[in-house]
Amino acid sequence: MAIHPVLRLGDPRLLQTATEITDFNQTGLTTLIGDMFDTMAAEDGAGLAAPQIGIGLRVVIFGFDSNPRYPDNNPVPKTVLINPKITPLSDEKEDGWEGCLSVPGMRGMVSRYCRIRYTGFDATGTAIDTVAEGFHARVVQHECDHLDGIIYTQRLTDTHKFGFTEELLDSGQLASDVCSE
Ligand code: NI
């Protein structure tokens, strides 16, 4: 397994639509997923999408343990989600600060559905069908956006609520260093 460099905003590969996995036994899928977990851990992220390491496939990973720095974010088990589909379970949305490993050192305010159902497949091709809310739902929406070439900076609710983490913390706009990506 290996840690890969994470592509940064401006790299055109981040703007492409990723391709569905059709063969769960395809060569390299296991290695890709292992590398994604290694890369996410090295970057201390809460999620990662394959296009962020330059692989245009519809594979995302996410998950994080409970962390006293993020008391509002309940732990989410480490998950591999392939060919995901998201269905909002209500029209209700909420604003929240997001960060992205492809936009290092910055945070922006994004509105996301509060409650979603997501389906897809795990690494072995077994179906996944999960209801999520709060930060869990936010991370899944953020990661799945990457598969359609969408970065959170395209979804800012207010361009005034976007900046460097350090300045947002110093000025009190960010209460704590919210979990990124
Ligand atoms: Ni991201």
Image (cartoon, helix red, strand yellow):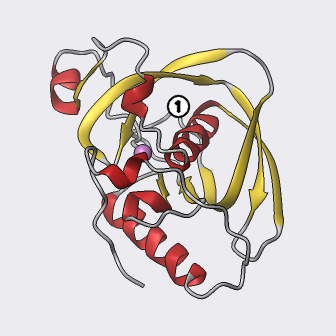
- Above or below residue 18? Residue 137 is above
Q: Is residue 181 visible?
A: no
Which image quadrant for residue 21? bottom right
Q: Residue at x 49, y 56 (%)?
A: 49
* Quarter of the image where the N terminus is located: bottom left
**Left or right: 55 as drawn, with respect to 9:** right
154 in relation to 25, above or below: above
- In the image, 22 versus 71, the foreground residue is 22
Q: Position of residue 47 (x, y in %)?
A: 49, 53
Near-viewer residue (172 or 37)? 37
* Residue where numbered disc 1 is placed: 72
Residue at 52%, 39% in the rendered image: 142
User: Residue 57: horizontal and vertical position, in percent?
Assistant: 56, 64
Q: Quadrant of residue 107?
A: top left
- In the figure, is residue 164 to the left or right of 135? left
Mark 1 close to ligand 1, CB under 8 Å: no
The residue positioned 42% from the left and 38% from the top of the image is 151
> Circle 1 sits in a helix, a strand or a loop, which is it?
loop
Left/right placement of residue 24 relative to residue 9 reads right
Amino acid tagged 1: Asp
Counting other residues with Cα less than 10 Å from the Cα at mark 1, is it few (<14), some (14-19), or many (20 or more)?
few
